[in-house]
Structures are given as C-alpha cells and as structure tokens.
Image (tube, rainbow, N blue to C red):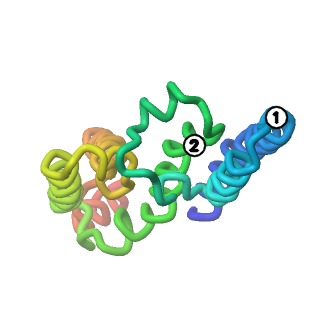
Amino acid sequence: TYSDFYFKRLRRIFPLALLAAFLCIVIMRKLQDDPMELQSGMKSAIYSLFFATNLKPQNLEEEYFLALEKANDFFTHYWSLSVEIQFYILAPFLLHLFKPKSENTSVQVYLAIVSYLSLLYFLLSPPEKVFDATLARLWQFLAGATAFHLEQCLNGKCLPATEKSSNSRAN
C-alpha cells in the first residue's frame, strides 16, 4: 500500500538525514566566522530539511564539484536525497494514476516512454540545468520500476485479467 511504501521510506531516510542536518548546523555555527557564510549555510539547512536542496537558487557559475572543493556549504550533498524524496512524491502519479489500466505490455511501453522522455531531457539540456533535476533523473528511478514490473511479468503475475480469472477458477 502507499502508506506502507511511504512509512518504510520515512523510517529509512528521515532519521539519519535529520540527524546529519542537525549535526551540520551545530558544526557550522561553531566553525563559521563570517556572518554571510553562516546566513548562507542556514538557508541551505532550511532547503535540506525540506528536501529541496536541488531547487535552491544557485550561483550559475558555480558547478557542483567546485562547490564540493570549496566546501563552504555543508548541505551540497543533500541534492541526491532531495531528488529521491521528490521522486517518491511523483511516483504514485507516474506509476499508478497515469499508467494504462491494463496489466499487459502496455505498462512496459508506458514506463519506457516516460523513461525515454526523461532521458532525452537529461541528454539534450545543459548539464548544469539537469544535473540535480528530478525530472531529468526519472529515467534512472523508472529503470528500477521497469525491472520490477518485468520480473512480475516473467513470474506470470501480469497476465491479462481474463487469463487471471480463468487461472484462478482452474485452481
């Protein structure tokens, strides 16, 4: 169920992410001498607590790896968690609400089309724009969903509804 799915994710991600953010805030307050750096760090902390680090306005000339080298933002690494959490928010819409109603290969085709569009966006857009963009990373997450659905089909669990009902009557 959706509630089980989200509860497992919350239990797995949130405690450690919040602990890491809290420790970063404490360390940052102790180490930062420059009030401007501290203010910038606190702004990053707020974005990280809401898993929106990848949505934070950034200096367009500063690349991700340069930011890591400078090490002035304790929350630079939170972009990947932000993308993951944002995917979990989008997943029910992409995987269940908008997918075709049948349980045969049209679901595989649907997932392939959404993945392909995301991959195209990733490949055709400027790297600095799509590096930490959730929509540009959908193809990576959907590869897992596609593999899961394909495994279900290979195990005989995605038969068309008419075959399922006749199989259950036979048993």
Q: Which percent across, then down, holds residue 145?
A: 35, 48
* Of 24 and 169, the residue lying toward us: 24
- Could you tell me which quadrant the N terminus lies in? bottom right
Question: Tag 1's secondary structure?
Answer: helix
In this view, 27 is above or below 116: above
Furthest residue to the top? 69
Question: Tag 2's secondary structure?
Answer: helix
* Of 83 and 62, the residue lying toward us: 62
Q: Residues within 10 Å of mark 2 (few under 14, many from 20)?
A: many
Q: Which percent across, then down, holds residue 38?
A: 74, 47
Of the two numbered discs 2 and 1 on the same chain, state the one appearing first in sequence: 1
In this view, 33 is above or below 97: above
Picture quadrant where residue 159 is located: bottom left
* Of 148 and 19, the residue lying toward us: 19
Q: Residue at x 71, y 54 (%)?
A: 39
**Disc 1 marks which residue?**
27
Q: Residue at x 82, y 34 (%)?
A: 27
**Disc 2 marks which residue?**
78
Asked if residue 156 can be seen in this view, the reply is: no
Does residue 22 appear left or right of residue 14 in this picture?
right
Q: Residues within 10 Å of mark 1 (few under 14, many from 20)?
A: few
Picture quadrant where residue 28 is located: top right
Does residue 119 appear left or right of residue 29 in this picture?
left
The numbered disc on residue 50 is none
Q: Residue at x 18, y 52 (%)?
A: 125
Asked if residue 160 can be seen in this view, the reply is: yes
Q: Which percent across, then down, holds residue 130?
A: 30, 50
Whole-angstrom CA distance, mark 2 to mark 1, is 16 Å
Q: Nearer the viewer, mark 2 or mark 1?
A: 1
Mark 2 is on which residue type? Tyr
Q: Residue at x 60, y 55 (%)?
A: 51
